[in-house]
Amino acid sequence: MRILKWTLLLTAAVLLWGLIYFNLAAFGGWFTYSLLKMQQGGHLSSAVEFFVFETPKVLMLLVLVVFGIGIIRSFFTPERTRKILSGKSETVGNILAALLGVVTPFCSCSAVPLFVGFVTAGVPLGVTFSFLISAPMINEIALVMLFGMFGWKVAGLYMGVGLLIAIVAGWILGRLHMEKHIEPWVFEAKMGEAVKEDAINWEGRIRYGLIAVRDIVSKVWIYVILGIAVGAGIHGYVPQDFLASFMGKDAWWSVPAAVLLGVPMYSNAAGIIPIVKALLEKGAALGTVLAFMMAVIGLSLPEAIILRNILKPKLVFTFFGIVAAGIIIIGYLFNILL
């Protein structure tokens, strides 16, 4: 009976979600031009309509997808992830690690315990790096916001490219045999015996998804609003030719410059993707903008500081250099092919 209750509640919630979501565009126009009586075609009215439409749209998509991913994540604890990756050949391990990074609830702030756990469990260094690259870069927030703003093709491209970078960069790092550049204390660390997991029924997994919504959305909603506000300003006020001149395909230096600009910034997908949408609408090239986004999400100074606790400087710089090079190459390819 409890499962039936949850099923009925979820069905009603999804139907209500769809009714609201598919009428947001009309609401944005009504709010801007009928309620506020703003003039169509103006800078301010364009920015307001962008903000009023995109804010509930992105938040609603975020809630739906975080709930679904939360249920998937209930199957992947850190111990289970380590068991899946340990004992695998490096190439297979790189692919599995990158794929697991998409659906597991870990970010750069979890880098130290995860790295120690993986290494002490016998997971190869390159495989560990594939996971550490994939987990923060390709997450449900990035994918849902890209899908909501650009459609499944761009979201799919981003996911495919992110996986490729994680797999190849991890494979290269594995071939370099840089284990001697891991801090010695990592190999001496004892993670302890894993506690036996209690079986979770579907009611428990649904509750896990609801908890994920509460925890994640409560942390990122302000970044969503701030990012959309910045994007709305760019959408309404920045001339298209201005951005196209230094972020367009003709500016050969735009991709490496975007990566260099993105590394010192610290943001998450919720804050950066609305800005990405506005940049693209104003003439910035897709490859340049995606390179900027990947650098902001996948590489950051805080992450470098965290990794320095477990890696010697040479390995930290090598890791950042290989990932940055991969992002730059992908950026150029996107600009050439698309």
Image: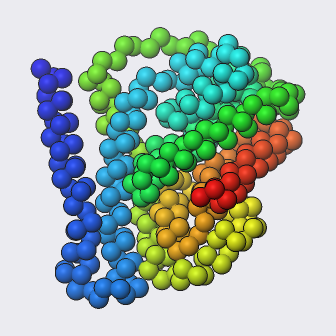
Q: How is the image coloured?
A: rainbow
* 322, 338: nearer the viewer: 338
Above or below for 195 versus 268: above
Above or below for 199 versus 180: above
- Residue 38, visible in the rendered structure: yes
* 98, 5: nearer the viewer: 98
Q: Quadrant of the N terminus?
A: top left
Dividing the picture into quarters, in which one does residue 7 lie? Answer: top left
**Residue at 22% across, 68% down:** 27
**Residue at 38% across, 38% down:** 212
* 118, 167: nearer the viewer: 167
Left or right position of 8 against 191? left
Q: x%, y% of residue 227?
A: 47, 64
Q: x%, y% of residue 151?
A: 42, 53
* 316, 149: nearer the viewer: 149
Q: Quadrant of the C terminus?
A: bottom right
Above or below for 216 versus 40: above
